[in-house]
Amino acid sequence: MRYVEEFRDPKAARALIARIAEVADAIGATKDEPVRIMEICGGHTHAIFRYGLDKLVHEGIEFIHGPGCPVCVLPMARVDECVEIAERPGVIFTTFGDAMRVPGTKGSLMQAKARGADVRMVYSPLDALELARRNPDREVVFFGLGFETTTPSTALTLLQAAREQIPNFSIFCNHITVPPPLKALLDDPWMMLDGFVGPGHVSMVIGVHAYDFIAADYGKPIVVAGFEPLDLLQSVLMVLEQIRYGRAEVENQYARVVPEHGNPISLKAIDEVYEPRPSFEWRGLGEIDASGLRIRPAFAAWDAEEKFGIGYAAGPRHVAEPEGCACGQVMTGRIKPTACPRFGAGCSPETPLGALMVSSEGACAAYWQYGGARVAAE
Amino acid sequence: MKDGLRPARTLRDERVTLAHGGGGRAMRDLVESVFTAAFEPPGMEDQARLTSAALAEPGARLAFTTDSFVVTPVEFPGGDIGKLAVCGTVNDLAVGGARPLWLSAAFIIEEGCEVALLRRIAATMRAEADRAGVRIVTGDTKVVQRGAADRVYVTTSGVGVIPPGREMAAGNVRPGDVALVNGVLGDHGAAILAARGDLALSTDLQSDCASLDRLIEATLAAAPGLRCARDATRGGIASALNEIAEASALSIELDETALPLRPEVKGMCEILGLDPLYLANEGTLVAFVPEDQADAALAAMRALPEGAGAVAIGRAQAGEPGRVTMRTAFGGRRIVDMLVGEQLPRIC
């Protein structure tokens, strides 16, 4: 736990909180006219609530919870397709744990498992490949989900499957990329954002320059941040300092992990295996150009979309959100989770309607679990 | 084995077959050679016939509980399913203030299960029962087809006696009472996760699996005002505390800096995105005592190996009935809710 505890030091945190308050006052941030900072990543949302940072910082700072939780932005149609694949005879459907509970119109993968589908939780796509080696008479499908953080591992796994010519393994690719939805959010006149805290793990792969357009084209500050409370506090301070002095730059708070140009090996693997889709649907945000990845035709033998004739290969399909579910508005920062009519009224972590209530990184689940909402409501 | 009974035949099979569940000689061989040989129950009738002076005491009450145990892997660092099955039921009795006396043990065995494994399980059960001063007096075995169970499941029921005048219940907790735990949190859950081997994490973690009857008796002797105790099994300490907060209509505030956690458990939780407050324990309890008896209770716990790491972790308060909160190391405050479903590792 060394190298973690030092980024949770309460004394250092108090000093940062005091500095944040000074700068917030200097730029005139108030409760009624707050500085609106979007933390893009669900991991940051979770950390903010876990450490109660939203209540510890100056009241003139408002956190807008961004779309960076891969489970939360997964459209219901894709969950339905997962369930359809999982329920085919002979299939072993493998997935990361937190995708198990996301509801689709046919229920979640966990419910499909209870109905008899062979759904297995794995910790790495390599575990899924190993299952394929050990079960040559079964088709093992891995649910490739997530941003640039998980994309390299599925790319490398697919390359390994191709090298070994393992015929009974395929990836159901739903990988997405971070920059396009940010552009969509910035183009939305409704979004009044003053700055961004960027996801450090994503930049570990893609570097920091992928965000240059935020500063150059939109004139907004962005600070790529780590995931510990001191990382987040320092990043907020860096965003505020930029605002104070009228700067708009891409800064790297997480330099201990994030190289400026990312990880070339990962980028090469991603590029070798995947290509951008013309467009991809995001839950709550709709179709966004070039925001999703698909497997290149050269690797069609390991592409579950091609193997099963499902997903975007079979023509995109859209399923309407459950009635009253305001995940989309929460995800774009238009409303707080508590303002959703279904928050706590038919939608809770026990019986989630929308994906934001399912994943621990979803804004609604974070509000619920750490009581931000219920404390605020009293 | 009692005099006059036919001695157990040696069981030669290495693995259990459906024949061992058939009710005939093969089943008798399995039961006698593996289970009754280890447990030495009094008498060979289908039911145990028991007498206890403790029961005859005016005001004494009978406590009766049952629990089923399924765990993968069946043997893990720090114990096996048999130890869990004895400790679990002994603890269910003990946390209610009962002195555990007798257990039953029923086994659902998967066809193909190794007989040697069953012998090891029976031996740990006997050893743990002796340690806790209980006897395994009756039992049952069933054999199911391969695939219908995962090697072996164990169900234990337990009977104990609550001495006259002893009243431990979550509803008794009062504002100002101090919450104590007897040791580190989450070891069992983390050890089981690591032992499953699919995380490629190597740790020296051991399950905390232990009987807590002696600890509770010692705590009661030092702090007679002990209001209640709960063993923090499935759902972890967070779920036990939420149950107590609800039953007592009080709130409970924890101090994050006081929580006893091993660095390995913390590290594993960091990697997987799990919260140690929700990890299962099998030898950890949370007890509430009046503030003026807290030091005495802690000293009594610390005098025993199963209580060596005892600390105060929080206190009960009036207001906000049913809510458990935690004061974070930063001075922030967050709600510690019941576990929903099961904890699922995060994606990234």
Image (tube, coloured by chain):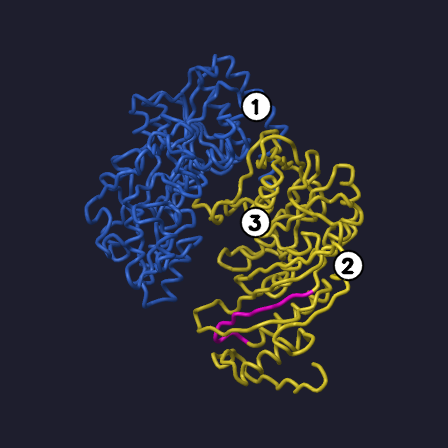
Chain colours: A blue, B yellow
Query: Do circles 1 and 2 both sit on a common chain?
Result: no
| Residue positioned 57% across, 53% down in the render | B189
Q: Which sits in the foreground, B116 or A298?
A: B116
Q: Is residue B152 left or right of residue B163?
A: left
| Residue in view at x 36 percent, y 40 percent | A353
To which residue does mark 3 refer?
B279
Q: Residue at x 62, y 47 (%)?
A: B263
Q: Are marks 2 and 3 on the same chain?
A: yes
* Label 1 residue SS: helix
Q: How many marks?
A: 3
Q: CA distance from mark 1 to mark 2?
A: 63 Å
- Residue ID for mark 1: A17
Which element type, helix, strand or loop, lies under badge 3?
loop
Q: Nearer the viewer, mark 1 or mark 3?
A: 3
- Residue B86: x %, y % from top left: 64, 63
The amino acid on which the numbered mark 1 sits, given as a three-letter code, is Ile
Which residue extends farthest left? A315
The percent position of residue A186, horizontal first and vertical second, equals 32, 25
Q: Is residue A190 above or below residue A198?
A: above
Report which residue position mark 2 lands on.
B57
User: Quarter of the image holding residue A327?
Assistant: top left
**Who is closer to the viewer here, A129 or A337?**
A337
In the rendered structure, which amino acid carries the disc numbered 2?
Answer: Glu
Inter-mark Cα distance, 2 to 3: 40 Å
- Residue range corresponding to the magenta coloring: B102-114
Residue B113 located within the stretch drawn in magenta:
yes
Label ID, residue A217 = none
**Most foreground residue, A339 or A172:** A339
